[in-house]
Image (cartoon, rainbow, N blue to C red):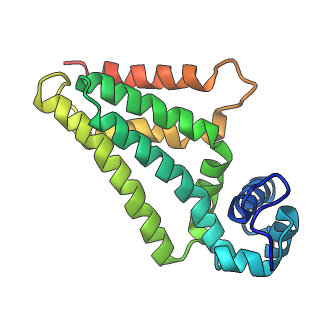
Amino acid sequence: MARTTDGKGVPVPQRLLAAATRLFAEQGYGSTSVQEIVEAAGVTKGALYHYFGSKEDLLQEVYARVLRLQQERLDAFADADEPVERRLRAAAADVVVTTIENLDDAAIFFRSMHHLSPEKNKQVRAERRRYHERFRALVEEGQRSGVFTSAIPADLVVDYHFGSVHHLSTWYRPDGPLTPQQVADHLADLLLRALRP
């Protein structure tokens, strides 16, 4: 029977995801074989197919796990008993920090999304849309209450912020002059400045 963890207690699915993420980041999704993934994870092909079913499922999960984390955190910010501008700023900064903390995952996904089947692509887009809609609801709440300007459509505000977030993997470097939190604070401040009445 295959072990479900390694000697350090890391479950097989996490080992497979870690190996796939590293290899997809280094070599690209298309150039990485299932055999390379299982060798790097120290498991059999049977274990990969037991937990994920296919290499494509691994690609989908690389992004989905980050999106789940971000959705949980956004829901907590949105539901907090705080003024709307504080909740939006916290959410806007958090998505930057969590993207930077998972930069390989984000880069892999945006480079390799076209490899997903139409069905999986649709699932991922639906999950991402749910996140964007919850974020947009914060903007709209502030606009309705007069805290934010209504001159800019909420959809455009969301596209503006997430355009910046989605491009982090093209320019952010861990050894650069700004920490993840500093980048997050600057981008969140830019967003809130744009929304001032």
Q: Residue 50 sits in which quadrant?
A: bottom right
Could one spot residue 151 in this view of the protein? no
103 left or right, relative to 64: right
State the quadrant of the C terminus: top left
Could one spot residue 36 in this view of the protein? yes
Q: Nearer the viewer, residue 117 or 94?
A: 94
Residue drawn at (63%, 62%) of the image: 112
180 left or right, relative to 162: right
Rendered location of residue 128, percent (x, y): 41, 55
Rendered location of residue 52, percent (x, y): 64, 74
Residue drawn at (48%, 69%) of the image: 121
Q: Residue 148 sits in which quadrant?
A: top left
Residue drawn at (35%, 43%) of the image: 75
Residue drawn at (34%, 55%) of the image: 130
State the quadrant of the N terminus: bottom right
Q: Nearer the viewer, residue 3 or 22?
A: 3
Q: Is residue 79 above or below residue 65?
A: above
108 left or right, relative to 42: left
Q: Nearer the viewer, residue 197 or 49?
A: 49
33 left or right, relative to 160: right
Q: How many numbered marks, from 0 up?
A: 0
Rendered location of residue 40, percent (x, y): 86, 62
Q: Nearer the viewer, residue 139 or 31?
A: 139
Rendered location of residue 89, percent (x, y): 37, 25
